[in-house]
Amino acid sequence: MRGALGGGPRLFIKRDDCTGLATGGNKTRKLEFLLADAIGAGAELVVTQGAVQSNHVRQTAAAAAKAGLGCVALLERRVDGRDPSYETTGNVLLDDVLGARVEFLPGGTDMNAAARERARSLTDGGTRAYFIPGGGSNEIGALGYMRCADELAGQCAELGIGPDWVVHATGSAGTQAGLVAGMVALGGRAHVLGASVRHPRELQQEVVADLANRTLAHAGLGERVAAGDILVDDGFVGPGYGVPTAATLEAIRLLARHEGVLLDPVYSGKGFACLVSRIRAGEFPEGDTVVFVHTGGAASLFAYEADLAG
Ligand SMILES: *Cc1c(COP(=O)(O)O)cnc(C)c1O
């Protein structure tokens, strides 16, 4: 792989695409804490939301099934101009197999408000429902990535490596917020770089810092971070959320054909494209160690057949 990139830093992959639940992914770490809270609150059912090909919804459906809870998921038609199969294959197919009840809503809907309202009305109707925000990104879910920072530090110590950089795709912000909070809590020196898949840099920096601070407070810690200290690259979003670019598709093929590892067209492919571009530009000093956090998502590859074929 390093040969194909013309040298550069030592590169490791943290395989959070192998977290175990129904094809894996980063939401599983958040759901470990969110489902515990739901069970503690006596919930019979969870209500969440995401875009049509949401990996978060698929992992929530799996976690709920395993915990013996029902799952209602609202899916936003956020990506325009896709083939009709976009709403039946990939993650949507798995949502159904996993027993979730899904419902499609128009693009632009305030999805967290809609899901919170649905949970309230189900509870009022006699079924105790627990609301999980999009991406599982609140101060409870982000604890999963604080713990991941600790796990990563331990694994790196075992291997005797830095790391100098941690790179991953950032969307609803819980992953980066948790990693940053964890680094701050551990006194780690690695830079955590999020490749945005949706928002412009400054907005994403603010959202990540706000959630990192709420997570630190929730964990009972006094440290705080500033938005200006959050590292975000918004150069790989392309035309918008859920729309892969030529660089995304190249990154997917590159990692598949050199390492046999599958990325996805919405998140991890954009995150890895960002990393590849920075390596090619010589932005990491030779001898630096970079850990790419593979956040999963390959289940959505099948919904992007037309983009990837040929
Ligand atoms: C949700 C998701 C992300 C982004 O993580 P956030 O915590 O929402 O920022 C990255 N990669 C994949 C595959 C995802 O499903």
Image: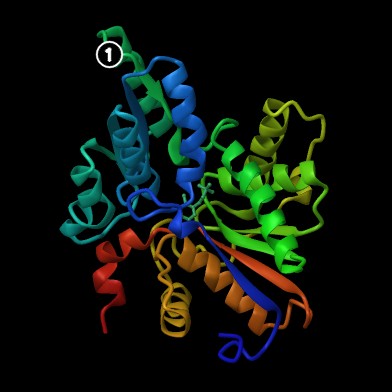
Q: Percent from the top left, x then y, of residue 11?
A: 64, 75
Q: Is residue 240 visible?
A: yes
- Among all residues in the image, which is located at the extreme front? 158
Indicate left or right for 112 with 180 as reference. Answer: left
Position of 70 relative to 135 (above/below): above
Give the residue drawn at x 43%, y 23%.
38
- Front residue (pair 270, 148): 148
- The kind of residue on which mark 1 rests is Thr
How many discs appear?
A: 1
Give the residue drawn at x 65%, y 42%.
146
Q: Tell me the crowding category of disc 1: few under 14, some 14 to 19, or many 20 or more residues within 10 angstroms, Cα based.
A: some
- Front residue (pair 207, 193): 193
Q: Percent from the top left, x then y, of residue 223?
A: 82, 35
Q: Which residue is mark 1?
A: 127
Indicate left or right for 154 with 28 as reference. Answer: right
Position of 95 relative to 2 (above/below): above
Q: Is residue 203 visible?
A: no
Q: Percent from the top left, x then y, of residue 242?
A: 39, 58
Indicate left or right for 148 with 273 as reference. Answer: right
Quarter of the figure that contains the N terminus: bottom right
Q: Is mark 1 within 8 Å of ligand 1?
A: no
